[in-house]
Each structure stands twice: as C-alpha cells, then as structure tokens.
Image: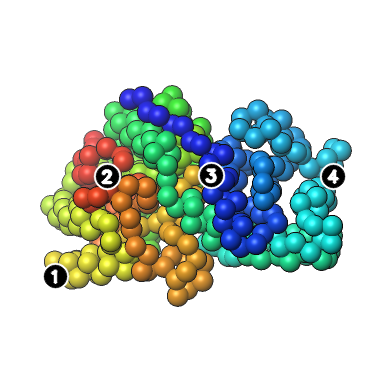
Amino acid sequence: MDYDYSVDCRKRVKRIQEKMEEWGLSAYLGSRLRTISYVGDVFCPWRSFVIIPKDGEPTIFTFIIDAERVKDESWLDDVRGYGPLGGGHQMDVVSDALQELLPETGKGKIGVELGMSNYLPEGYLTTEELAALKSKLPNAEFVNAIEIIDELSMYKEPGVVNRFRKASEIVDAGHAAVMEEFEVGMTETEIAGIAERAMRREGSEWAWSFTGGNEIASGYRTAYPMGACTPATRRKTRRGEPLMVDLHAMFMLALGDHAHNYLITPVSRRQRELAEYFIDTVNRVIDLYEPGATPARIADGVLSWAEKRGIAQYLIPGFEHGIGLMGDEWRIGVNNGPMPYWTNPDHVYEPGQMVICAVQMMVPEEKIGFRYEAPIVITKDGCEVLAKTPLEVTELG
C-alpha cells in the first residue's frame, strides 16, 4: 500500500524553538539518537550532535567519515564532521559552534540532554563531554532540557504513523517467510536470516535492535525469567518445543517490532492450554488500550483479570514499552514520574498520535515461554495494532 510518509521538519524545529524561548535558551545541544532522528530525519549511527539555534536551521555534527552521507540524506544543509582527519575534536567543534550562538558576554543558557537509561545507545551527554563544554564555555549556563524533545516527539505526525505502518508491514513479511520456509532442525540463526532476507526485500533499512537484531528463541530459551533478550544462537530447533520469533525492522527511521510464537509438533494438550491462556491475556492487554488509559491502570486491569483466571503467576508484570524513531523511546512520555528517567505510571494516553509497543510475556512453570510485542496507535475508540500477523500460537512441523 502507498502511504504519505512526509514530515515537515522545519515545523518540528519551529516548535522546538518556541519551547527554547519559553526556557530562555540561546541554543539546544541534542546528543541523543532520538533527538537527532527527530530533528535531522536522518540515520546517524556514529556519536553525533545537533545544535538548534534560537532562529534558523540546526547543524548536525557527526564522525567525519560519515558527514557527507548524512548531508546527502538529511534535509539539513549544514552537516559538519569531526575527527582526527582534519575535522577536529568533537567537543572543540561543538563548543566553537555554540560560542557563535551566545551573546558576546558568553553568558547565555544552553539546553543539554542529561539523564540515565537502561537503553544502551540512548546518547545522553557524558560527564566528560559536559566537563569539556564547561571548560570551553565558562560563562554559559547548562540546563537539562530533555523534556522539550520528549514532549514534542511523543506525538507522531500522520506521515510518521504511516512510516510505522510500513515498518510493521515489513515485519509481517518476515513472519510470513519464516512460516513458509521453516523446517525442524533449523538453527535460530537460520530463522533470523530467513526473516531478515524477506524484510530487506520489503525495504527494511536496519535490524535495529541492540539486543542482537532479530531475536529468536527455541526450547528452554523462550522461558528465561522476566523475558530476557534472546539474540539468535546456533541452537537447533527440536520437535515438541516452543519457538519465539521477535523481528525488528526500520523504515525511514520508524521501527517495526513484533513477536510471534510457535509450537513445534507434536504439541501436547498442556502446551495448547498454556497457549490459549497467553492469547487470552494478549487480547485483554490490547482491549485496555484506549484514550485516558494509563500504564498503571492497564497493569492493574491485566493482573486482576489474570488472578481471576488463576494465571497471574505466569505473567511478567509489564505490558508495554516505548517505541519511536531510530534511537527508540524505551520509556513512555516525559520524565515526570516518581522514579527519575522511567515511565510515569500515571501517563495518560491520548488518541491519534501516540505510538507505543504493547507487550505481553508469559513464562509458565513448565519451562515454556511466550512473548508478544506489537506497535499500536491509540485511537478515539481504543487502539490500532499495526502488525497484521494473526494473533495466535502457530503449530509448525
């Protein structure tokens, strides 16, 4: 299906600059991947920075070997390289550019991105980087301004939502290929390769997950406590075992993330019973997403329902994670909850422009595990699940 993927990046920048004015900022220094993706609309895998002035267009700074490619693919004209090949140290070139945006006294206020994360490539400004900036700009005031980007990027434009739709279609193609080509005895890495080949053919630009690309787990590996990360291994699939296929794609910086579950024949009555528990739970999770819902309300609703069913002990007590443009939004919303830098349990979902990843993981006593992940869009009536791979536990073999 043809979608409109367009995004008005200048409008995004204008909104950021309006927030900067409210904060009294002379400049904003973005160092997080999500910020660079949001502002530059370009893939920047190296340590990179974006400087947003009070007026005018931003500047991206990236490793010198990649600067020309970034300039070619970004809407921005000003992309500068740093490095030992004539570009200079990154903090030298960044501080020189910031100095140009400060008053002559050098006493302006600069917004930076400070914090902590469980997501490895988040990109917060490091202690060493901040110390270098302070030494080079001694009269400037540095303030943590991550809320500006977090608040604005949380709401996805229609073109961005369509990018997520396409990314989910790509992931669906990966699942279809696995279903068609699977043979008992294949290794987890072979399965990952089948899916990756199919998704690349459909336009995926990167198996984005830092958990090892596409996550494939078979047998006991589906049942690690708390769900775990399961990068594909050379373990061979076996009859009578479960198989979990969690695929990741990227399309125009939007991420696809969907997990589907299998049982390899022969399948026992108990395995089918557990699979039914899992599917019922996932349906319950999806039903609870609607405008006005909160992470806490969803968690309470699912757990109380599971307790009545007598299956609460099987569930991993987490039912979502953030998902955004390349760089991810592993937490949901802005940093305003009771635990710093984690999702606020009282964050309120609003219709139309919020994309999150619905999650359910179940690890029963029998050393069999199931995982569900799928990006959803909150609608006025509930939610739209973007991936269309049927919600079932498929029997193979």
**Kind of residue at disc 2:** Glu
Q: Badges 1 and 3: C-beta atoms under 8 Å apart? A: no
Tell me how far mark 4 sits from mark 1, CA to CA: 63 Å
Label 2 SS: strand
**Disc 2 versus disc 3: nearer the observer:** 3
Which quarter of the figure has residue 321? bottom left
Residue 256 located left or right of residue 366: right
Label 3 SS: helix
Q: Badges 4 and 2: C-beta atoms under 8 Å apart? A: no
The outermost residue toward the right is 86
- Picture layout, residue 248 above or below residue 372: above
Q: Which residue is mark 1?
A: 308
Q: Position of residue 226 (x, y in %)?
A: 38, 63
**Kind of residue at disc 4:** Gly
First in sequence: mark 1 or mark 2? 1
Q: Which mark is residue 224?
A: none
**Kind of residue at disc 1:** Lys
- Picture layout, residue 33 above or below residue 41: below
Q: Which residue is mark 3?
A: 12
Q: Which residue is mark 4?
A: 88
